[in-house]
Image (cartoon, helix red, strand yellow):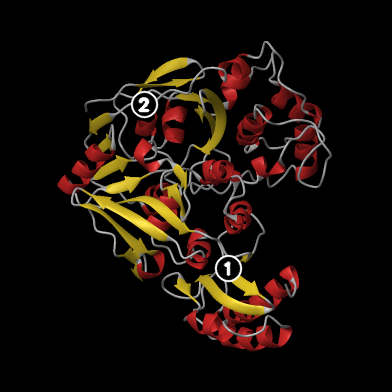
């Protein structure tokens, strides 16, 4: 094995030498004797494995909670990680640990270290400030969505919420708070040759493309929220892993006169903050996309690159008429998202190509909506997902774009429904007729999440629901 360094865990460097490429950060930490973080589901749903990592926030840092069970340990060369053990000790509890203990926020304790880390990351959020509370935000500004990826089966969530809402601001002498004034560690370019696989964190886009040209069987990984599940639950192993999550060429947001271009390796949380409401339809997607823990790692490029028919962003991006910028050593090409998917988890992207960015044309349609039908409101996979973008002027639908997920082998446009709306008055009568057309869109199937009949019924309900939400404007 070659090219492995160390990861700083709770302030102490821990050597990565001997770590296999497909070993998760969670397993690495537990092998180091740090057994607070647990494996509950191995797919990023329960949050028992949550840890904090230092991530860039301009010229400073922020503590970001991530699922340690999903990400490869080799990707954390040179990075800083904090586990529940690094927050406090039995004789000197961290404020988060103390509030959870005082308010009965733990019973069996299996999930507690994960809750502690997710709660601590929100505790240190720089712009958290007291304000008017609501059902999702405490009087101290604590956003309960920070815990949406942490599940507890025995304590009950009220005492956990009470602990979160009782937290004050970090004290001035808090070393983890003081750490945020300094820059986050830069990614360390590295190549690892191990017995199980090869791992590359390229220094720049050119190196990444050269690796893909040399190894067309390589798996490209960013947040690893999908690939980590494949490794953990399906036992998949790739001969080569190329980590692109920190490539600067894939991490920009450009707002121009005719388009907004979104870097494919920006996490969904980063996109939410950087867009700051510029794309209202995506603002409806973010809260319904898995959990904050997942959004802290998941990327647009990854959600589109997997080609899943039940990804949450494709329906919205189809409605936005987005295109993808695909790049290889042969150059860059732009492909409309509507032409990108070719079959179940298949696309026009070639093995040596990366998704560099997603481009959303401007101006945006003013009437938008995103409907996700799932068994849970948050932290769940959709049975049906629908993105709407309509232009309505003088009471007439001038343009309609509707993206669908979960009703075919690929995400699709509802072309027949769009045609049934365009040029017609935006009235309940038009909506009712188009809703029946929409009932027949796609080729839904029966599976564990929903029956085909249920999916068709949800399609038929979607337009009337949108009309009720936005009115007859």
Can residue 301 be seen by looking at this rendering?
Answer: yes
Q: Which residue is mark 1?
A: 389
Give me the disc on residue 210.
none
Q: Is residue 392 above or below residue 215?
A: below
Q: Is residue 306 above or below residue 295?
A: below
Residue 211 in percent (x, y) is at 20, 42
Secondary structure under tag 1 reads: strand
Q: Residue at x 72, y 15 (%)?
A: 171
Based on the displayed image, in which of its 4 quarters is residue 187 positioned? top left
Can residue 196 be seen by looking at this rendering?
Answer: no
Based on the displayed image, in which of its 4 quarters is residue 289 positioned? bottom right
Instruction: Of the two numbered discs 2 and 1 on the same chain, state the one appearing first in sequence.
Output: 2
**Separation of marks 2 and 1 at Cα, in angstroms:** 43 Å
Residue nearest the observer in this picture, 332 or 160: 332
Tell me the quadrant of the picture where the C terminus can be found. Answer: bottom right
Residue 442 in percent (x, y) is at 48, 80
- For marks 2 and 1, give the one nearer the viewer: 1
Based on the displayed image, in which of its 4 quarters is residue 180 positioned? top right
Tell me, yes or no, whether the two marked residues, 2 and 1, touch with CB atoms within 8 Å: no
Residue nearest the observer in this picture, 406 or 162: 406
Q: Which residue is mark 2?
A: 77
256 vs 196, left or right, is right
């Amino acid at each position: 094995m070659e090219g492995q360094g160390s990861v700083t865990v709770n302030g102490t460097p821990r050597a990565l030498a001997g770590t296999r490429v497909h070993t998760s950060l969670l397993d690495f930490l537990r092998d180091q004797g740090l057994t607070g973080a647990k494996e509950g589901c191995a797919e990023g749903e329960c949050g028992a494995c949550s840890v904090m990592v230092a991530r860039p926030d301009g010229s400073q840092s922020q503590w970001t909670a991530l699922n340690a069970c999903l990400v490869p340990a080799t990707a954390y060369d040179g990075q800083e990680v904090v586990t529940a053990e690094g927050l406090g000790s039995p004789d000197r509890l961290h404020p988060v640990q103390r509030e959870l203990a005082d308010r009965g926020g733990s019973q069996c304790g299996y999930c507690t270290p994960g809750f502690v880390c997710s709660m601590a990351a929100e505790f240190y959020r720089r712009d958290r400030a007291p304000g008017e509370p609501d059902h999702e935000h405490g009087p101290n500004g604590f956003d309960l969505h920070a815990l949406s990826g942490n599940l507890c089966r025995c304590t009950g969530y009220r005492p956990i919420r009470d602990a979160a809402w009782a937290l004050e601001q970090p004290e001035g002498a808090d070393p983890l708070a003081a750490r945020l004034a300094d820059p986050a560690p830069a990614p360390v370019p590295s190549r690892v040759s191990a017995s199980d696989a090869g791992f590359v964190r390229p220094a720049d886009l050119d190196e990444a493309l050269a690796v893909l040209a040399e190894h067309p069987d390589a798996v490209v990984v960013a947040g690893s929220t999908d690939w980590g599940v494949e490794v953990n639950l399906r036992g998949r192993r790739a001969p080569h892993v190329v980590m692109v999550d920190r490539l600067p060429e894939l991490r920009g947001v450009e707002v121009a006169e005719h388009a907004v271009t979104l870097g494919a390796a920006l996490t969904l949380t980063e996109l939410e903050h950087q867009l700051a409401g510029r794309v209202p339809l995506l603002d409806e997607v973010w809260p319904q996309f898995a959990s904050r823990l997942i959004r802290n790692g998941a990327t647009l490029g990854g959600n589109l690159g997997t080609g899943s028919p039940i990804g949450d962003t494709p329906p919205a991006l189809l409605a936005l008429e987005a295109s993808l910028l695909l790049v290889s050593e042969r150059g860059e090409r732009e492909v409309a998202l509507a032409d990108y998917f070719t079959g179940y988890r298949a696309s026009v992207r070639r093995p040596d190509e990366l998704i560099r960015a997603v481009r959303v044309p401007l101006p945006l349609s003013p009437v938008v909506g995103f409907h996700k039908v799932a068994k849970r409101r948050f932290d769940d996979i959709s049975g049906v997902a629908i993105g709407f973008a309509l232009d309505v002027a003088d009471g007439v639908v001038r343009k309609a774009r509707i993206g669908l997920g979960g009703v075919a082998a690929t995400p699709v446009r509802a072309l027949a429904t769009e045609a049934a709306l365009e040029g017609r008055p935006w009235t309940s009568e038009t909506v009712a007729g188009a809703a029946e057309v929409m009932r027949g869109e796609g080729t839904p199937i029966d599976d564990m999440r929903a029956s085909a009949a249920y999916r068709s019924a949800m399609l038929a309900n979607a337009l009337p629901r949108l009309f009720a939400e936005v009115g007859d404007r």
